Image (cartoon, rainbow, N blue to C red):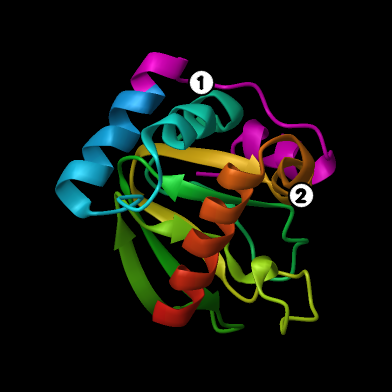
Amino acid sequence: AGMKPLYTQIRSTVQSPTRELDVPSTAEALMWLRRDVGLLRDMPLGDLEDYAELCAPLSFGTGDVLFARGEAASWFGILLSGNVKSIVPDSGGSDFVLGEHRAGKVIGAARASQWENSHVRAYTLKATEGGYVAVLTFDALESLQQSNPGLHHGLMRLLLMELMDA
């Protein structure tokens, strides 16, 4: 399976892609992750609801590439469902698997770190089971500094905590 056009759309533009899951369903998925996985438990409910409105939940199928090693890191996301693996493709056609991730995992966070000079993906992220990812562009995250500082702080904290665990 090739790349989904929506992921290509994220790559080729700074615009947020069109959402594929409505706001109530997105909020419900985020609340489930908060309750059952512990993700976002420090974020006030109002900020959680704001994130559900701001993000673009996208579907992916088994075998889809969510992002590829070497491409520009323009977005991050929270896996709402499904499973993915992070891999480094090798020239011999086999993949070196770095890790496997399921619902509740923050993906694509590396650009948020102040010490990371490169805005290029270090690995490829490929779906092993279809699901949804709640995507937010880094440009949209940056604009939250002015429009919603509380949510900006909460998301930056989430991204940096993810990087500490990596």
- Label 1 neighbourhood size at 10 Å, few (<14), some (14-19), many (20+)? some
User: Is 92 part of what is drawn in magenta?
Assistant: no
The local secondary structure at tag 1 comes to: loop
Which SS class for mark 2? helix
Identity, as a three-letter code, of the amino acid under mark 2: Glu
Give the percent coordinates (x, y) of residue 16: 72, 32
- Residue under the image location 44 percent in, 30 percent down: 46
- Dots 2 and 1: beta carbons under 8 Å? no
Q: Nearer the viewer, mark 2 or mark 1?
A: 2
Q: Position of residue 38 (x, y in %)?
A: 23, 54
- In the image, is residue 100 above or below residue 11? below
Q: Amino acid at mark 1?
A: Glu
Above or below 104: residue 20: above
What's the distance in space between the residues labelled 2 and 1, CA to CA?
23 Å
Between discs 2 and 1, the one toward the N terminus: 1
Residue to which mark 2 is pinned: 142
Residue that numbered label 1 is attached to: 20
Q: Position of residue 40 (x, y in %)?
A: 36, 50
Identity of the residue furthest to the right in this view = 13
Q: Position of residue 32 (x, y in %)?
A: 22, 36
Give the extent of the magenta segment.
1-25
- Compare residues 5 and 43 and report the one nearer the observer: 43
Q: Is 16 within the magenta?
A: yes
Q: Nearer the viewer, residue 147 or 55?
A: 147
Residue drawn at (26%, 44%), measured in percent from left and top?
A: 34
Q: How many marks?
A: 2
Q: Is residue 31 left or right of residue 49?
A: left
Query: Which one is nearer the viewer's eye here, 158 or 151?
Result: 151
* Quarter of the C terminus within the rendering: bottom left
